């Protein structure tokens, strides 16, 4: 016991029973050791007042089995794919996403058709459309909107 520090040696003596005056005098040089030993003494007295509990005969075997289970749990990977548990959740999520996509597509088609019907109704209701006479001269009007290029032969003759 010479290789252990003084407080640990006295603590072990305290666990076995009360300290004698000679043992207390060994720790007198260290006030922190005395305070720690006093606290340890009160804790031992409080534990001694607790009633003795009956322990089952297979208590040690149960503790060792629990330790083995903990060690086995520690050797397994932290996460593994449990497909039987996740398959229904994934299936329901996929079904909800498919229904939402179908609804969104139908909504977009309906909105497009509605906008087209609204624009056709506006065009049909307006009376500012040109008459048939404007369509007779369509080619002339179209040529007027095209860019005019200078006639190179005419320009050379004029010079």
Image (tube, grey):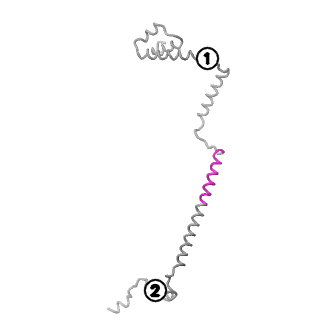
**Is residue 69 positioned above or below 6 on the image?**
below
Assign a secondary structure to mark 1.
loop
Assign a secondary structure to mark 2.
helix
Q: Which residue is mark 1?
A: 52
Rendering coords of residue 50 (x, y %): 58, 17
Asked whether disc 1 touches disc 2, contact meaning CB atoms under 8 Å apart, the reply is no
Q: Which residues are magenta?
A: 84-102
**Is residue 80 positioned above or below 148 on the image?**
above
Rendering coords of residue 138 (x, y %): 49, 86
**Is residue 104 positioned above or below 144 on the image?**
above
Q: Which residue is mark 2?
A: 141
Determine the residue positioned at 64% across, 51% down.
92
Rendering coords of residue 135 (x, y %): 51, 86
Query: For the residues marked 1 and 2, what is the alpha-carbon distance in whole angstroms?
Result: 114 Å
Is 123 in the magenta? no
Is the stretch drawn in magenta largely helix, strand or loop? helix
Give the class, few, some or many, for how many residues have Cα within 10 Å of label 2's Cα (few <14, many ≥20): few
């Amino acid at each position: 016991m010479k290789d252990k520090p003084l407080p640990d040696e006295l603590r072990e003596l305290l666990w076995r029973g009360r300290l004698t005056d000679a043992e207390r005098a060994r720790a007198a040089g260290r006030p922190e050791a005395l305070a720690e030993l006093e606290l340890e003494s009160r804790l031992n007295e409080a534990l001694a007042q607790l009633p003795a509990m009956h322990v089952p005969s297979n208590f040690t075997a149960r503790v060792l089995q629990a330790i083995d289970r903990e060690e086995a749990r520690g050797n397994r990977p932290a996460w593994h794919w449990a497909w039987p548990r996740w398959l229904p959740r994934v299936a329901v999520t996929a079904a909800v996403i498919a229904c939402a996509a179908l609804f969104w597509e139908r909504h977009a088609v309906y909105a497009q058709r509605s906008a087209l019907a609204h624009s056709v109704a506006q065009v049909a209701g307006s009376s500012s459309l040109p008459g048939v006479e404007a369509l007779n001269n369509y080619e002339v009007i179209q040529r007027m909107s095209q860019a005019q290029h200078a006639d190179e032969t005419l320009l050379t003759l004029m010079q």
